[in-house]
Amino acid sequence: MAKFAKKRVTEFPEVIPVTEALREGDIFTKLSFLIWGLGNLVRKQIVQGLLFLGLEASFIWYFISFGFGALADFITLGTEAQTEVFNEAKQVYEYLPGDNSQLCLLYGVVTIFVAIGFFLVSRAATRSSYIAEKAVKAGKKPLTFKQTINEFNDRRMYQVFLAFPFGGLLLFNVMPLFFMILMAFTNYDRNHLPPGNLFDWVGFENFTRVLNTGSDLGRTFWPVLGWTIVWAIFATFLNYILGIILALIINRKDTKIKGFWRFIFMLTIAVPQFVSLLVVNTMIQEHGAFNLMIKELFGAGPLPFLTNVTWARVTVIIINLWVGIPYTLISVTGILKNIPAELYEAAKLDGAGPVTTFFKITMPYMMFVMTPQLIVSFMQNINNFNVIFLLTNGAPATDAYYRGTAGKTDLLVTWLYKLTIDNKDYNLGAVIGILTFILMAAMSLLTYRNSASYKEEEGFS
Amino acid sequence: MEKKYRSATTQRKVTNILVHLFLVVLSLIWIFPIFWVVLLSFRVQKGQYITSFLPSQLTLDNYVKLFTDTAIFNFPRWFMNTLFISICSCIITTFFVLAISYVLSRLRFKIRKPYMNIAMILGMFPGFMSMIAIYYILKGFSLTEGPFIYLALILVYSGSAGLEFYVAKGFFDTIPRALDEAAIIDGATKWDVFSKIIMPLSKPIVVYTILKAFMAPWLDFIFAKVIAGADPRYYTVAIGLYTMLNKENIMNWYAPFAAGAVCVSIPIAILFIYLQRFYADGLSGAVKG
């Protein structure tokens, strides 16, 4: 037990809990939580102290000039709508600008993040003061500014290395996501578009509308969810099994020019998807290349690749084989070579044919080794935007779905895209995004955390 | 006995021929759409509706039109746009990815595990769910008009690099820690370890990261479409070519689209196939037994 505790201490030597600083530190360290840099100034770390103070001044200036107002607007989401006033002199209607709910929401989110930042810097200021205090008490000189900077080269390098990617992530991933999640709880749809209209908080109303099987939205959501899952199952398992069979055929001892075959299949995924899938899309149109070929060869009429629901669904699954099998081929080739040869030899001695060997040896082994990858690819297929969007764009369209926003081959992600980009139902798009996330999170919690790569992460170090 | 032996070899020969025939047929199916694009790019007919399967005559006009008829669709400009954006975002992304992978693999600090868990959770949201919000944030900084679109796209492509650490971290994990420790005993700082020990040992993964980051702007059409919006001067090739297939343009631009697709696909395909080797090397680790 003692050994364990010791190990933890050496693992994070630099972390001093802020609670300890607040409890054990002197009055200046305690005050540093409110007046940043005070402790540093007292301990003659002039530059650090002034930097902290300047930072605090700019934070406070931000809150007084902008932040507090933004938080108030964030709660109301704006009170005055844009109004139309008739201008007698010019004989035209003029618009008096009102509150813009969307900007209220955005600035509110930004201010919340700034407030969290304020709190974090408060902690850093306290900690910095406490470190200086301890150095003085131990009879040492507190770190000069230059020494502090040099620390970023070594002991605190991880902070520099993390800071920039983390900042990018915060600005372009976390904050926008938070913003979108909040939209799910508003009525920001096509009837409440700023700046002409205000939108407001509505709580869980959107969620109940989408999940309710009786409502117009629910009658779209559940069938689209069903097709998304059917699609993901077919796309994942067909690609996987057929890909393994193809890999086995190419890897047979007697197959010649193995590299050439692999190259051919790789070529199709090397071409950007927006090229290959868009071209296939034009080929399966009513007057596209496939129908032309069928007409020239058999004299038959155009096949309803994109107009009949069942045809369209089967078509995308089959064309997805064309996209997906090469990926399987690349990822399984190495693993297939690892299957112990003794297993195959024993099977051969027992008189098993290639089909029996495949189902009794190859598949069980591959499933055992590759289950985590299979789950990842299942989740990627649930979110497979490119294939559906470029290949069918949801076609065939149907009036049965909510205001015709989704087609019969639309997945949840492409429906989300259409709801937000084409129809400006931002709140519904956000709800679909959150529900997709819940689906993915539930699946990955069940599987990813049990996978070997997660548990044995420290295996090499 | 001899007879039986002979029949076994004939059977093997027949199987071999069948297998190779099967592979030829499959290859033809797989290669067909690519062949179709190349054929299209040399077609005389410009539109989508074609009357005969094989073209009666071939021409280079589509390539000429693509590079000279720049009034509506300025393909050369799009190409340069994409090149510029991808070079800039590639530099930033590569630094971000390598830095974060190194830190997560080599250093131990308090927020390491929480960070990895949060990254996993963020990765589960549909990627473009935040797109609208990103657009409004960029608009808030007035980065969605004029040449600032370049900056906006560079930021968007490199902004989420902090999530892409899995492959590089896995590679760094395989470099023995004894190397770091020896260097630190000799007085090296952590920066020295990163720049003088880890980086030279990680060539495959560095190349992989660079090429992957370089390719992203050529392949994305969702973000580019939303951010570059209606201003075709700042389109990337992906979104530009996508626009050529709009209902109003497809009649005149289907064949030039194919020409553009060929021009973009050749370098991307070469990079991709080159990348595969590094990817396989990267997965197999730095130090071979």
Image (spheres, coloured by chain):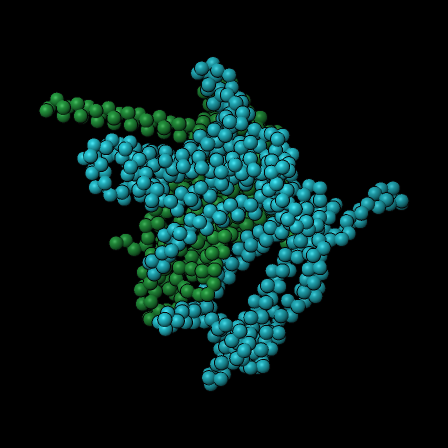
**Is any part of residue A184 visible from this angle?**
yes
Instruction: Name the residue rendered at 36%, 29% in the picture.
Output: B27
Q: Nearer the viewer, residue B70 or A348?
A: A348
Q: Is residue A431 left or right of residue B40?
A: right
Residue A427, position as x, y percentages in the image: 64, 45
Tell me if residue A140 comes above or below residue B271 in the rendering. below
Between residues A241 and A389, which one lies in front from this camera angle? A241
The quadrant holding residue A208 is top right
Image location of residue A297, percent across then percent down: 44, 16
Residue A161: where, in percent of width, then height?
47, 62
**Which chain can be seen in green?**
B
Q: Quadrant of the N terminus of chain B?
A: top left
Report the residue that reaches farthest toward the top: A299
Q: Residue at x 36, y 40 (%)?
A: A330
Instruction: Please indicate whether residue B282 sits to the left or right of residue A416 in the image.
Output: left
**The hue in which chain A appears in the rendered picture of the protein:** cyan
The quarter of the rendered structure image containing the C terminus of chain B is: bottom left
**Residue at x 53% of width, y 32% of height:** A409
- How many numbered circles are shown? 0
Establish if A112 lies above or below B236: below
